[in-house]
Amino acid sequence: MRILIATDAWAPQVNGVVQTVSQVVAQLTAQGHEVRVIHPGLFKTIPCPTYPEIRLALWPFTRLRNELNWFKPQAVHIVTEGPIGLAMRLLAHGRKLPFTTAYHTQFPEYVKARSGIPIRFTAALLRWFHRPSKAVMVPTQSVINTLKSRGLTSCVLWQRGVDLNRFNPQQSAASKHLSYSPRDLPLDDAQQVELLRRLNACSIEKPVFLYAGRVAVEKNLDAFLSLELPGEKWIAGDGPARKALEKQYPEARWFGMLNHVALAELYKKADVFVFPSMTDTFGLVLLEAMASGCPVAAFPVNGPLDVVGDSGAGVLDWNLKTAAMAALKIERQVPLEHARSFTWENCAEQFQGYLAPIGISASVPKQVKATHKPISNRP
């Protein structure tokens, strides 16, 4: 099948959307599908207001129209609601081509956190954007319930996965020899070795509470950094709020943006992964941490409720300090076993099953069965 994917999120961005789409593309390509990804790197771009690390494509309409004419896709999927996603939505809808969309980001909540604009206004825009979609792929049931309450009825559950070869509790070769040899040790990474040397040279006060992800206002990092906790707080990631937060909380260790190989080392060394966000749809970092044997502390909100739930792999509590301290008592094997039930193979299978083939009349695609045991939405 020829599959055209339109996305405003792509490398060099490092986030859950890019990770998910990259993994799905790799899985589909390995199965013999021809996948064409239209991303900001193919266009002239400008920095996103308030978030300059994200680049927005300028005038993507003509290029997308040509891609549709040349590639002749048998299915079209729109990942994001940015300039590329909007242009593809207008083109596909105008040509009466069936297409699917995804809901990766709690956009109304993010906009409210950044600007104060009421949720009802941005929710109305999202309803207009996604309404023609044959299937709106959503990562958790709780977010599906929220979207349905806002008038989107074509939502389907599209779960995520984790790369267990990359994220696991096993000691890496790099941590043993602290050197980088790409010819002899292709799985090692220069940034990984540099990080390990840095950690090896300093004194670490246990326990270690780790956050990894964007450093932005909507991630609610103050709720974590302001806690009185024993040991150390580690922050891996970058974003528009980092400079101010780093100045406000100099006692925390700030590692900046790390690739996945280096980040995997932090998960292994951390005692608890703290996730203070209250606006995420899923939180891939939750799976990465658990796959490394690191238990989770979070609020009982969308994302953690679905990913952690009552699995015993973490503690969800409206008092984040209570959750963090209680998570210290969880055996590392518990989150590891829970994370193993999420696979990228199943994620790609669901994605393919939801696609709306062009030229074939179809309603909302049938739900694809999940491979892991459902989780209760109780904290």
Image (tube, grey):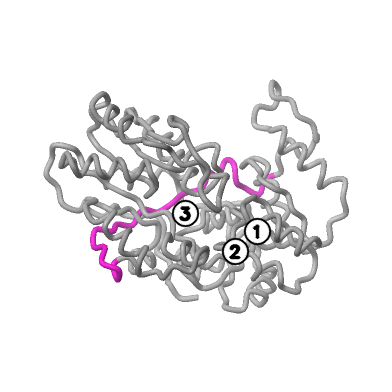
Report helix, strand or loop for mark 1: strand
Residue 287 on image: x %, y %: 54, 55
> Furthest-top residue in view?
183
Magenta highlight: main SS: loop
Circle 2 residue:
275
Q: Amino acid at mark 3?
A: Ser
Please identify the quadrant where the N terminus is shown: top left
Read off the magenta span.
148-170
Report helix, strand or loop for mark 3: loop
Q: Amino acid at mark 1?
A: Tyr
Q: Residues within 10 Å of mark 2 (few under 14, many from 20)?
A: many
Asked if 220 appears above or below 365 in the picture, the reply is below
Circle 3 residue:
341
Residue 232 on image: x %, y %: 78, 62
N-terminal of the pair, mark 3 or mark 1, is 1
Report whether 189 appears left or right of 112: right
Front-most of residues 285 and 168: 285
Asked if 329 appears above or below 98 in the picture, the reply is below
Q: Residues within 10 Å of mark 1 (few under 14, many from 20)?
A: many
N-terminal of the pair, mark 1 or mark 2, is 1
> Furthest-left residue in view?
361
Pair 3/1: label in front: 1
Q: Which mark is residue 152?
A: none
Q: Are marks 1 and 2 in contact (CB under 8 Å)?
A: yes
Q: Amino acid at mark 2?
A: Phe
Circle 1 residue:
211
Residue 268 on image: x %, y %: 69, 51
N-terminal of the pair, mark 3 or mark 2, is 2
